[in-house]
Amino acid sequence: AQKITQTQPGMFVQEKEAVTLDCTYDTSDQSYGLFWYKQPSSGEMIFLIYQGSYDEQNATEGRYSLNFQKARKSANLVISASQLGDSAMYFCAMREGASSGGGADGLTFGKGTHLIIQP
Amino acid sequence: GAGVSQSPRYKVAKRGQDVALRCDPISGHVSLFWYQQALGQGPEFLTYFQNEAQLDKSGLPSDRFFAERPEGSVSTLKIQRTQQEDSAVYLCASSLVTRTSGNGYEQYFGPGTRLTVT
């Protein structure tokens, strides 16, 4: 079973609209972290936002917010007031395991969503 | 300040050749990761270093893949006897802290090396 599922291979959104990128995850760990990265055509992965499994509040970073629904194992990214420069691949990722003594070191990524912002 | 740099940015190798990919992490970063990103896919974890120690190599696809970080800074990913399925972008990432700091530490990625095996 996939650990990170992104069901939207591609999305077209009008500039200035809000957009929600879906992400569901699968883990049996109680302690884990969820990340969103942006990958423009240049190829570099840019960190956007982080949500810890014990965080009670949804994470926000500027125009980015993470809609964390733990019971549904969902961590959707919301981009408000989209801009042309937001066009890129977006990846949801997870790090599993406790903060000490074990746990995966690397991130597990989904297959990504290709977001295109139209003027 | 300088970010993570990788060289070469592009590499074309004939099947059977050995290649070496270099990663210069952000100065002072303890943790270093290698990922492989096939076309149209998300990155997949290959290996992890904490300083010079390779603590996790569970993602290396075969014994043809070898990584080192002898002085705890620059790292090299070596692929021996390259095959067509090795064609991918190889991403390096570094982090200031280690996993004992919790799950939330951010990894800073380099631009990647695009390897094409012909």
Image (cartoon, rainbow, N blue to C red):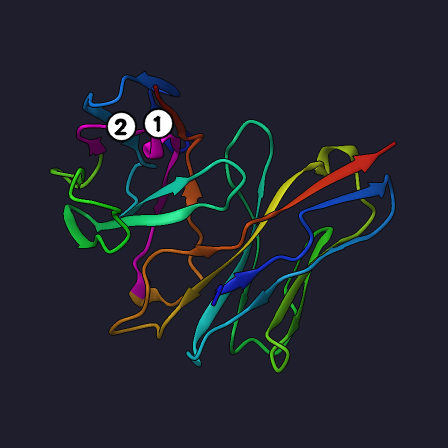
Asked which quadrant contains residue A50, the reply is bottom right
Instruction: Kindly identify which chain the residue marked by label 1 belongs to.
Output: B
For residue B22, which numbered disc appears in the image?
2
Q: Which amino acid does label 1 sit on?
A: Gln
Question: Image check: A38 left or right of A10?
Answer: left
For the point 51% across and 75% down, the residue is: A53
Q: Nearer the viewer, residue B49 or A108?
A: A108
Residue B81 highlighted magenta (yes or no) = yes
Residue A39 lies, in percent from the top left, at 57, 38
> Which is nearer the eye, B104 or B111?
B111
- Residue B63 location (% of width, % of height): 15, 43
Q: What stretch is highlighted in magenta?
A: B76-99
Question: Going by the image, does A17 lie left or right of B90?
Answer: right
Instruction: Give the percent coordinates (x, y) of residue A20.
Output: 75, 56
Q: Name which quarter of the figure residue B28 lies in.
A: top left
For label 1, count other residues whose C-alpha is less than 10 Å away and answer few (under 14), some (14-19) or many (20+). Answer: many
Q: Kindly tell me whether residue A69 is visible in this rendering.
A: yes
**For the residues bearing labels 1 and 2, Cβ distance under 8 angstroms:** yes
* Whether residue A44 is situated above or below residue B100 in the rendered picture: above
Q: In the rendered picture of this protein, how many numbered marks are placed on residues?
A: 2
Q: Residue furthest left?
A: B70
Residue B55 sits in quarter: bottom left
Q: Which mark is residue B6?
A: 1
Q: Can residue B68 be seen in this view?
A: no
Q: Position of residue A110 (x, y in %)?
A: 53, 54
Q: Which of A41 and B64 is in front in this view?
A: B64
* Tag 2: amino acid: Arg
Q: Which chain carries label 2?
A: B
**What residue sits 52% from the left and 78% below the top?**
A54
C-alpha gap between disc 1 and disc 2: 6 Å
